[in-house]
Image (cartoon, helix red, strand yellow):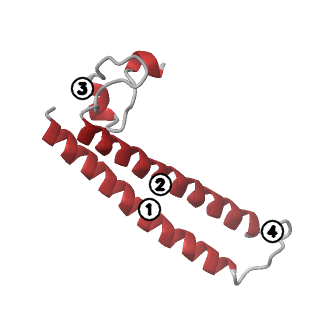
Amino acid sequence: MTVPQHRVRIAEERADAERRIASLTGRFTAIVEGSEFTTDDDEHDPEGSTIAFERAQVSALLTDARREVEDLTAAQQRLDDGTYGVCIRCGRPIAEVRLDALPAAQTCIDCAG
């Protein structure tokens, strides 16, 4: 892949993650607003644990998506700096197949293991 192709791929991945953030944020808000009509006693409310679990699950997915945006932003910075595709541990090139699968990869497969 060429540098312009990597830029496009990183931008696409970042846009996907940002769409997930927007969708998950809306879902989280809906869960919180919906829980206003339920009892605060999750232990005895048959729906309480389900609501708490769903809220925690969406929160974890939001955290992952935000981290992905941060990682992709860092990958974009490495592209700008000319260090994209170079392992931060050993300094060897990161295989194209790894960068294709994980555009934000910072390490080669040997160092990742």
Crowd class of label 3 (few under 14; some 14 to 19; many from 20; radius 10 Å): some
Amino acid at dot 2:
Arg
Give the labeled residue for mark 1: 21
Of pointers 4 and 3, the one earlier in the residue sequence? 4
Q: Are marks 1 and 3 in contact (CB under 8 Å)?
A: no
Which label sits in the foreground, 4 or 2?
A: 2
- Residue sitting at the far bottom: 37
- Residue at the location (80% across, 76% down)? 40
Give the labeled residue for mark 3: 96
Which label sits in the foreground, 1 or 4?
A: 1
Q: CA distance from mark 2 to mark 3?
A: 25 Å
Q: CA distance from mark 1 to mark 3?
A: 28 Å
Q: Secondary structure at mark 1?
A: helix
Of pointers 4 and 2, the one earlier in the residue sequence? 4
Q: Secondary structure at mark 4?
A: loop
In the rendered structure, find residue 42 and report the number of the disc placed on it. 4
Of pointers 2 and 3, the one earlier in the residue sequence? 2
- Residue at the location (14% across, 42% down)? 4
- Residue at the location (63% across, 75% down)? 32
Q: Position of residue 33 (x, y in %)?
A: 62, 80
Q: Are marks 1 and 2 in contact (CB under 8 Å)?
A: yes
- Residue at the location (37% across, 60% down)? 18
Amino acid at dot 4:
Asp
Q: Are marks 1 and 4 in contact (CB under 8 Å)?
A: no
Amino acid at dot 3:
Glu
